[in-house]
Amino acid sequence: MTIYTEIREANNILKKYLGAKVQVWIFDVSHKRLALKISLPTPSTGYPLTVYIVAITCEHITGAFSWKNGNLVINECVDNNFGEVIKLTDSSAHFELIASGGFVVAEGMEEEFGTSFDNLLGGHVE
């Protein structure tokens, strides 16, 4: 598994997954942490290569819980309601997630990831 925390690097990874399936995957009861799962079959092996995006201190979400043909982009901006935030958007899916605590993007084989926030990224997200 490879972890990315810089916006430029994260967006370069997300470009590789243009057209992938996106799903809201794991979230805290308070929705302050939320993980999106992005998956695209790997042609050579048939096993899905997966990306998880974990948004931290989520403030607002709009859109579906899952969609095909994903085109996610991460931007840093100042929001009138929340101050400095990251916005994770997929304009064609009408999806927007605003988080004021940052993000982590992780890429790897599905079996490398856990099934809860406690072990999803091997301890990289508190």
Image (tube, grey):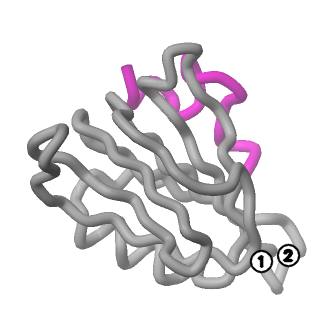
Residue 27 colored in magenta in the image: no
Q: Most prominent secondary structure in the magenta stretch? A: loop
Q: How dense is the environment of label 1, judged by Cα within 10 Å: few (below 14), some, or many (20 and up)?
A: few
Residue situated furthest right in the rendering = 46
Which residue lies at the image location 55% right of the left edge and 19% below the top edge?
28
Name the residue tied to disc 2. Answer: 45
**Corner quadrant of residue 94:** bottom right
Give the side of residue 111 with respect to residue 119, left or right: right
Instruction: Classify 10 Å Cα crowding around label 2: few (below 14), some (14-19), many (20 and above).
Output: few
Amino acid marked by disc 1: Thr
Q: Position of residue 50 (x, y in %)?
A: 66, 59
Image: 89 above or below 43? above
- Point out the image quarter for the C terminus: top left
Q: Which residues are magenta?
A: 109-126
Residue, far front:
80
Callout 2 amino acid: Thr
Q: Residue at x 68, y 61 (%)?
A: 22
> Can you give x and y, in whole percent of width and height, for residue 59 in the image?
34, 34
Determine which residue is flagged by label 1.
Answer: 42
Foreground of the two, 99 or 64:
64
Please indicate whether residue 47 sits to the left or right of residue 6 in the image: right
Q: Nearer the viewer, mark 1 or mark 2?
A: 1
CB-based contact (under 8 Å), mark 1 and mark 2: yes
Q: Residue at x 38, y 34 (%)?
A: 58
Q: Which SS class for mark 2?
A: loop
Image spot of residue 122 (x, y percent): 51, 29
Q: Is residue 114 magenta?
A: yes
